[in-house]
Structures are given as structure tokens and as C-alpha cells.
Image (cartoon, rainbow, N blue to C red):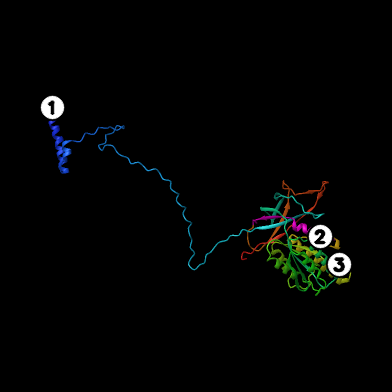
Amino acid sequence: MRGNAMSSLGSGARRSWLGLALAVALAGGVPARAQQQPPAPQPDVTPDSGGPASENGAIVVPKKKAPVDEAPAPAPAAPRIKNPEGLPPVSIKVEVPEVTVDVGVLLEKTHQFVPGLKLSNFQVYEDGKPQKVIAFKRAEAPITALMICEFAATNYQFIYDMRNAAFSFAEQLRPQDYVALMTFDLNTKIVADFTQDKREILSAINSLRIPGFSERDLFDALYEGLDRLSRVEGQKYIILIASGRDTLSKITLDKVIDKVKKTPNVTIFTISTGQVARLMSEGRGGWSGQMRDMDYLQADNQMQSFARLTGGMSFSPRFVAEMPDDFNSINAAIRSKYELIYHPTNAAQDGGFRKLEVRLVDDEGKPLTFQDEKHKPLKYELIYRNGYKARQEVE
């Protein structure tokens, strides 16, 4: 047994030294310190998981550096689009049509303005279709007005009424108002340009004493006045004081009606003159008198049409005492109004005429009614432009 054990030990030792010799031969020799002190055996560590022990010893895991707060990456730049060579910079502009409707609410009997209305009390229809109002306010601001007065060598009663009406309007002007005076017979004449000086307007009216021609070119004068006001920004007014007859205009009634519809932000108020002279001569003169009466009936219709198309008012005072009340009504309609703004559902720019309708309703959607202190119903009227002409796409 001992011999076998020694023999077994000897064979194991030989194998160990043979392995060491082979390693030394491959490495090219054994260092002196390695020959004197053989390396200490490593402890046999068994992993917790039960797997085989590693022959490489402990593994050193490098420590991770703490994260550093970095600024976020900048947003990518917007793509730059270059125009083709030879083509200048091009921009696209989209316009949304916007319509402004000035509405005056006046009691029929006293012509007093009705305050205190809300947005929910107004309904706007364009060509019968309801529109959504996006802005609403009560406006009371200085006015910009052009007086167009007929100053022709006809019956003195017409000139007398014209001067009294012009004086009545000028007396109610305020310091912030801009007013101009234009007269017409065969030709038109700017007697006073736009001014805030009431005395200048009164002096210009007072200078209208000796007329020239007997012709009354109403259509030419109104067309020219509308053309002049189209170059003035904001809301404008025309105070047309005339008999309503036209005798020798180059512009036809259809053309001046089209101009009235096409000119935005202009309201026309008309004062028909010579009512007393007309009443005294009505029915006299045989056939020629009947033709004259027909001419004046047509003249009244024309004056009323100019006012109605633009949301204005028309008056035919017979006496001087009526004029201050008439111009009080005009001032109430001009200075106190409700401004409604909407984007039309029909955005086509075809130059067509759009008919407008404004209604007053209560909180339940029923027609709005007013009562006096005795609970009696009060009639009222809405003063607004009955339509507008859409822009042409080529404009």
C-alpha cells in the first residue's frame, strides 16, 4: 500500500513539474524570485449561483461617471425655400371678407335712439342666410360729412329751403366734426373743403346768394361726391339738400344707383326742398303741370332711394320750423348707432350685390317689442344699409 501511495504521489508530482517546465520553456525561462517563492495558491471561490469558479480572479468594474446636465438640442431650423432664379420674392396673402353694418334703432314717434341693446338682440341675414356676428359695439364718434346742395336759378323757394336746411345742419356740428360743402347746378363746385371750423361752413352757406345756371345735374353731383368720399377712410355721410330733379346729367340714374351700392361706408341723408311751392302749384297748369307733378314724384322717389340704399333717412319739410327736428333725427342716427361686424358665409368675390336684413329679437328669439311707462307698445325703425356690393376678385 505505501509503495502504491508513493508511486501515485510521484506520478502526480512529475506531471506538475512537467507542466511547469513546459510553461517555462514557452516563456523563455523562470525569474529568480519565481524560482525561490512559488506563487500562493488562489482560494477556490464558488459563485453564489452554484456555477464553476472563475480562473481569472476578481473582476474590476469601472465606475460610471455621474451624468452631466446637458442643454437640449436646438430645434431644427425651418426649411428655407429658395425662389427659382430670376423670380423675385413672392408672398401669399389671404384676405377674409369682413362686413360692417351700422344699425340705428330709433323710435318712430320721437326719433329717439334706443340704447341698452345687446349682441343677442341682433340677427343679421345676408341674402336670407343667417350670419354670425363676431364683433359688436355702440359707436358714438365725430362725423365726416359732405353737404351737397342744389343751387340753381329756379324758384326762389327752393333756394330758401336749401339755405335754411344747410344752416340747420351746420348749427348742430361739434368741434370734432369734419364737414365740406359742395354745390351744383350745371356744374359742381367745392365751396368749402373739409374743415372743423363751423364758422367757415356758415360763411360758405351765407355766400350762396346769386345762382348761375338753371340746370340741375343731380346725378353728376352725387356721383362726384361719392367718388371724392371713396378716398376718405372711415365712415362718411352725405347730406343731400335738393329738389331731387335732374335735368342734364351725363351720368344716368342706373349708373349713380350702382355707384351708391358700390361705395362702402357712406350713408346718405336727403332733404327735399320746395315742398310749399310744389303744394301751391300742384294740379295747375294743365298737361305741362301734370308732367311737372310727375317729375317731382319721381324726384321724391329718387331721394328716398338714395337714403334707403345706404341706411340713411329722407325728409320733406314744408316749413322752416320742421328742419331743426329733422336734423336732430339725423344727428341721433349718425352719432348713436350699433356697429355689427361679421364674416359672410358667401365669401365669393364676384362683384354681386348682397342683400342685408337686420332683425331685433328678445332672449327667446321672438321679435323685440318696446313699451312706454304706461305699457303701451312703441313702434321703432331700424336704420341700416340694405345691402352691399362684394369686391371683384381682380380688384
Amino acid at the residue labelled 3: Arg
Q: Nearer the viewer, mark 3 or mark 1?
A: 1
Which quadrant, please, contains the N terminus? top left
Q: Which residue is mark 3?
A: 278
Q: Position of residue 167 (x, y in %)?
A: 81, 64
**In-image side of 14 versus 307 (left or right):** left
Q: Secondary structure at mark 1?
A: helix
Residue underneath mark 2:
326
Closer to us: mark 3 or mark 2? Answer: 2
| Quadrant in the picture for the C terminus | bottom right
Q: CA distance from mark 2 to mark 1?
A: 145 Å
Estimate the spatial distance between the alpha carbons at disc 3 and disc 1, rounded to whole Å.
160 Å
Q: Where is 105 relative to 195, above or below?
A: above
Badge 1 amino acid: Ala
Q: Residue furthest top?
A: 1
Q: In the rendered image, which quarter is residue 277 located in?
A: bottom right
